Structure formats: C-alpha cells, structure tokens
Image: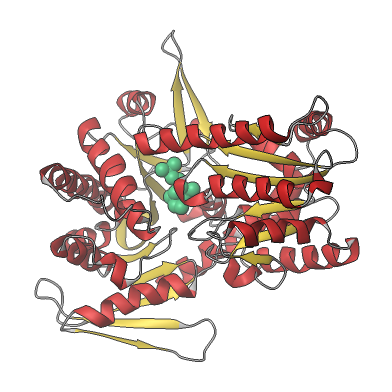
Amino acid sequence: MVAERGAEVLVASNRGPVSYGLADDGALTAKRGGGGLVSGLSAIGPDAGAVWVCAALSDADREAVRRTGGRLDPADTGGQAVRMLDIDPGVFDGAYNGIANSVLWFVHHMLYQIPLEPVFDAAFREQWAAYETYNAAFADALAEEAADGAAVLVQDYHLALVPGMLRERRPDVRISHFSHTPWAPPEYLRILPDDVRDQLIWGMLGADRLGFLTRRWASAFTSECAGRWDHMSVTTTHGVTPQRWYVEHTRTQLPPTRTTDVDVHPLGADAAFLRERAHRPDVGERLAALREEIGDGRKVIVRVDRTELSKNIVRGLHAYARLLETHPEWRENVVHVAFAYPSRQDLAVYRDYTAEVARVAGTINDTYGTATWRPVILHVKDDFARSLAAYRLADVALVNPIRDGMNLVAKEVPVVSDDGCALVLSREAGAAEELAEGALTVNPYDIEATAAALHEALTMEPEERAERTKRLAAAATALPPQSWFLAQLEALRD
Ligand code: F6P
C-alpha cells in the first residue's frame, strides 16, 4: 500500500483514524473515527499516496497490528493507508497517560493545583524516558515511510519531540507540527524541569513550520523562544493578517542557522458534513426522544463535552443552579441538557471529576426537581447522533472551558441549530478569538457572570438570536477542515 519510493505526504498522530474492538470469538471490528484531521486528510485524495502513522491504543489495536504487520487493511480505514505502531504497553502508558495527559496537557491548560503538584520525581523521569522512546518510534516509522523530500505533518503535544528526531534521521523531508491545544505562557511553562522544557522547544523547532489554532497560543510559543535562549531570535509580521512569526535558531547538531515559521490556522467546522449528518433518521429519532425527555414548551441549555477537567463542567452546573436560584421564573421552564462523555478514565483525577459532575447534577435535580420537571438531563454515553440532535434543538449552548485550544462544539452548534441558538462562550476558549462578536463571552471562573449570561441568552429576542447565529456560523466555517489541512500542506511545500 505504500508506494515503493515512499509516501509523499505523511500525517503522524497518537490517535489514528481507526480503532478496533475484539469480540470473544477473536473477530476484529474496525471503528472509523471522525474529527477534523480525518476529514482534512480526505481532501488530498488517494493519488497523493499519503500515509497516516498512529499508535495502537488498546489490546484490540495491538491485535490488529499483529495480524497485519502494522499496515492496516484498507477495508478498515476507508481506503486510507494507515501504519499503526505497536508500542510496548508500559512505554505507551508512561508517554500517553504519564507525560502527554498528566504533564503536557496540564501545563498547557494550566490545570495544576499548584501548592501540591506537580512533583517531578524519579517516576516522572521514567515517564519522560518513555515519552522519548515513544516519540523515537514515530520518528523511525516516519523516516522509513517518507519519500525523498516528503511533507510530514506531525500533530499535537504527544509528538513534540518528533520533528527534531525526524530531522536527524531524514534531513531531506519537510516537517510541520501542529498544536491542537493552547500553549502555556512562559511563566507557567517554566514549571517544567529546565532540560525537559528545552527538549520540547528544540524538538518542535526541528520542524520547518509550526501551526497553532490561535494568535494567542502562537504568540505564547514565540515569547518562550524570544525570552530564553541565546542563538535564537524571533521576528514577526506585525499588522499583517494572518500574522506570522519567524524563529531563527542555531544549534550545533543542526545546520548552522535554521528558521522555523510559526503561523495560525484556526480549524473551523465542516458545515456540509454536519448539516447532512444532522438530518439523518438516527438524529431525528434522538431528537424526538430528547424532546420527550425535556417536556413541552421548555427552553433548553445544551452542553456537549468530553468529561475533561479543562471543560469546566462543574462550574457550568453551579452557574445553572445559580440561575435557578436568582431567577425562579425559570424553574419548570428550562432544562439543562448536559452530555459529558467519558475521557481518559485510566487517570484517577478524571474518574474523580466524572463522579463530581454526576454528583453536582444530582444535587441540582434533588434541590429543584419536581414530579414533572428534571432540571438537568445528564447523559454520559458517547453518542454523536444524540449530540447533533441536542445542537439542533438548543436555545442556548454553554461552552465555558477554563482553557481550550479551540473548542469545536462552539463552532458546530450555530451551524447545525434549527432555530438559532445563543452561545455563552468562555473567553478562554480559542474559538473566542473568532466568535466573540456573536457570542456572549464570560470569564469561566465567574459563576455569577455565567449565570447572568445564561439568563441574557435565554431572554434574547428571536431576531437577535437568529442574527447572531448567522454571524457565528459564518465565522465558524471560515476554515473548514479540508482547507485547514490543505493550507498547512501547501505552506509546507512552498
Ligand atoms: O485537543 C487535543 C486533542 O488531541 C484533540 O485533538 C482531541 O479531541 C483530544 O485531545 C483527545 O484526547 P485523547 O486522545 O486523549 O482522548
């Protein structure tokens, strides 16, 4: 499946476009993932000979690798050439649960409870070694698969060391790295041990281009480069849209002086896909079921998230409770539909947070609920069709992360909404950079202000709501996944 001369375009990400299930009888079932990267990559078409390199995330994935030698059956991947890496489970655990999700995710989302954490001890050092091994496995695979001068698009904080490692192995290829998370400001990034921080920055600067979702995250990264190292200088195209930064750096094992371009690609919603998908019969069925659950004539506040610490679900529930307390006229007349889908349940802190979400939702229902009205409808089973149904019927969407690279829910709701939807949006979500005009923006820590914004959203005149929804949808779809992906690819090939 990989042409003999190698692939011209490669994507590397921890989570690939397909995952497997293993039945008791040993049969493997493939589940194709959605998301911006999958639809973005489909834009380059089969002739490009693109290969996607990803990690096996489960025992079933490892079994698929064992049976296929890692080059997955195209029947399972919708024709996409995928090389899945079977990384030793202990190494994967240290790299993914340890460094990627418990350190880098926490740093970039500024999630640490600082007086007690983090603790960088011997266990951390073992995890860091695992992260290096895991990144090296990707760099090896990419080096093997790439044609001369190929374009390699590396994704996210799991693979921050890959650009530097790959450049050492294959100086001929063009490399980009895209961050789907925020980037921590220098004052927060310096929590990391100095050598680890240096390795991350130098790893990423192995790329020819670095991409971020917003100016804010790109600017935090370039401030880090400008502030700390000798032999590194940053210039920028002030006043030009889109802004671009150039990081010039010198390092002994690299060619004398190299420049890494840094720019911003704000991933948008895929309107055509979402609108078509949201009007299929399975979504219609869920819409009817949700309407039944909610009851006639009630306004609906919707939120859809992974149960993720940065999503701020608990404060969102407190803000809703405060709305019911301060505006009793909403009792019986509004329902909060909260979908909080399980995420990273291998980590205790995520399990505890999941339990806290359920506890607070239960308390609101116990305090305010009546025989005829359940104030919070909480669903935790991941169901994309039901999420789309909720988007369609929402009067208000609550998207209140304490920090978020972009947040695609904020962009998807206005595109899918049937009758217009007011958006209460955290100013700390990357999406706020484009959507602030149409949304009601809030400080996500401020429960009083969030409750007030919910009230304002619920009482917004239909004409204003429709007009804002239109503006939000236009901004949300400015850079759909396929254009987002092609823009990066073209920039890399330039
Ligand atoms: O936001 C960064 C990201 O990698 C997203 O692309 C994705 O939605 C999320 O994190 C998923 O995390 P995980 O693979 O750990 O479930």
Q: Residue at x 66, y 64 (%)?
A: 476
For the residue pair 281 and 69, the one nearer the viewer reads as 281
Residue positioned 57% across, 60% down in the render: 446
Q: Quadrant of the N terminus?
A: top left
Kindly tell me whether residue 49 is visible in this rendering: no
Identify the colour scheme used. Answer: secondary structure
Residue 157 or 438: which is nearer the viewer? 438
Spot occupied by residue 175 in the image (x, y as percentages of width and height): 33, 65
Of all residues shown, which one is farthest toward the bottom? Answer: 239
Dividing the picture into quarters, in which one does residue 480 lie? Answer: bottom right
Picture residue at 38% right of the left edge, 65% below the top: 183
On screen, residue 408 versus residue 186, left or right, reads right
Q: Position of residue 339 (x, y in %)?
A: 62, 38
Asked if residue 445 is positioned above or below residue 288 in the image, the reply reads below
Q: Percent from the top left, x then y, of residue 471?
A: 76, 69
Residue 452 shows up from this direction? yes
Determine the residue located farthest toward the top in the rendered image: 25
Tell which of 8 and 340 is nearer to you: 340
Position of residue 256 in the picture relative to residue 15 (left or right): left
* Left-right relation of 233 to 212: left
* Quadrant showing the C terminus: bottom left
Residue at the image point whose x is 42% and y is 34% from the top: 352
Classify 54 as above or below 243.
above
Where is residue 237? Give x, y as percent.
Answer: 44, 89
